[in-house]
Image (spheres, rainbow, N blue to C red):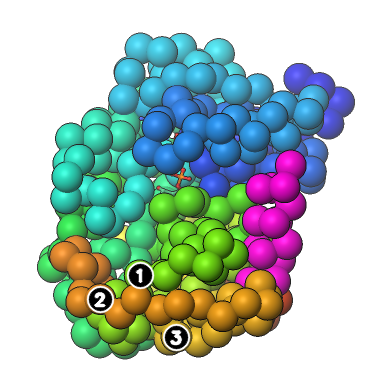
Amino acid sequence: MTDLANRRILVTGSAGFIGFHVARALLEQGEQVLGIDDFTPYYDPRLKEARNAQLENHPGFTLARTSIADAESFGTAWRDFRPQVVIHLAAQAGVRYSIDHPQSYIDANITGTFNLLELARHNPLDHLLAASTSSVYGANTDMPFAESQKTQNPVSLYAATKGATELIGHSYSHLFGIPATFFRFFTVYGPWGRPDMAPIKFARAILSGQPIDVYNHGDMVRDFTYIDDLVAAIIALIDAVPGTDAVPGDSLSPVAPFRKVNIGGGNPVKLGDFIDSLERAIGRPAVRNLLPMQPGDMQQTYADIGLLEALTGKRTPTSLDDGIAAFVDWYRGYNAA
Ligand SMILES: NC(=O)c1ccc[n+]([C@@H]2O[C@H](COP(=O)([O-])OP(=O)(O)OC[C@H]3O[C@@H](n4cnc5c(N)ncnc54)[C@H](O)[C@@H]3O)[C@@H](O)[C@H]2O)c1
């Protein structure tokens, strides 16, 4: 352990968009972090390498370049590090990609999370925190989406695998007393973001004068969450270990130290307003190519963040214009480098 070390925290998916930001924030507050990532080629691995290179500058960081779907190498890395807290962010993400590449969702999300739960079963932890998604709300139409709603109507395999990890996680939490929090993230954006998501796709197109594909003719609403707000919420939740005491509006299981928590901005934005904000930050107009709804997409997402606030205190989200401006600054700098 280095002098900086406080807790030993394992972050899966540390070279990914969210994992990188979470690991960096933990390192900056003096934690010791083991990152696990296998740099999958879902999008340009050079972006993952660039994120990872920043983490490697911290003395408290170690990387295990391995797949969580490989029980043996994952287990060796875990046992060598002996984590007290695990933040599980590795996954095959993306709604649309799951239509043509279903197997990668089963391997990373189902097998990988199962391997992780087996390790947590045999190596007790203070707290397991794992990423699920707002996509589990699927075809639900009651807005805002609250953790108390049933999530039996996924509209993509991605959502179905994430919902399955919540269920498997609950069973392990119940059977083996693993304190577990499953987050449901709502459309996260910001610097170092994912190239398969709208902000980068749109920024790239606007800067090069190409049209942007706007699905459902622009009639889409997303509860965009700025990355720094998400990271602050995740770190605050590390200490909100599910026990037996429920807070108001809690999703705490009656039989396990297990809860689900939405992490969103709580402030849904129309796709058109999001594009307007990008145009302002970039200083160029977008050419909008209006298209029909894509299979697997949800028309609207809107997070009820009452439980998050009950657990971590009232939050003031970053405004869309501020978040987009920070994203565009990063995007320009990264591509100029
Ligand atoms: N970004 C969002 O808006 C959003 C919304 C809802 C949920 N989520 C969830 O948050 C988590 C992080 O998402 P992200 O946006 O950072 O995605 P990302 O794709 O940038 O990061 C995921 C990381 O996991 C790694 N990975 C994938 N399969 C692996 C495996 N088998 N073994 C080891 N590493 C593996 C990838 O290489 C990648 O670096 C995911 O669980 C995702 O489903 C993200």
Quick one: label 1, few (<14), some, or many (20+) residues within 10 Å?
some
Indicate the quadrant containing the N terminus: top left, top right, bottom left or bottom right: top right
Indicate the quadrant containing the C terminus: top left, top right, bottom left or bottom right: top right
Q: Quadrant for ligand 1?
A: top left
Q: Is residue 87 magenta?
A: no
Q: Secondary structure at mark 3?
A: helix
Mark 3 CB lies closer than 8 A to ligand 1: no
Q: Nearer the viewer, mark 3 or mark 1?
A: 1
Magenta span main SS: helix
- Residue at image position (24%, 40%) is 105
Relative to the observer, which residue lies in front, 316 or 81?
Answer: 316
Where does label 2 land, which residue?
Answer: 291
Q: Is residue 117 left or right of residue 52?
A: left
- Residues at badges 1 and 2 in contact (C-beta under 8 Å)? yes
Query: Which amino acid type is marked by label 3?
Result: Gly
In which quadrant of the rendered view does residue 280 lie?
bottom right
Query: Which amino acid type is marked by label 2?
Result: Leu
Q: Is residue 137 left or right of residue 211?
A: left
Q: Is residue 335 magenta?
A: yes
- Residues at badges 3 and 1 in contact (C-beta under 8 Å)? no
Confirm whether residue 18 shows in the render.
Answer: no
Where does label 1 land, which residue?
Answer: 213
Q: What whole-number distance in Å separates the C-alpha atoms at marks 3 and 2?
A: 13 Å
Query: Which amino acid type is marked by label 1?
Result: Asp
Where does label 3 land, which residue?
Answer: 272
Q: Residue furthest left?
A: 153
Q: Secondary structure at mark 2?
A: loop
Q: What whole-number distance in Å separates the C-alpha atoms at marks 1 and 2?
A: 7 Å
In which quadrant of the rendered view does residue 102 lie?
top left
Find residue 104 and report its horizontal and vertical position in percent.
Answer: 24, 35
| 217 versus 66 height, above or below | below
Magenta span:
324-337
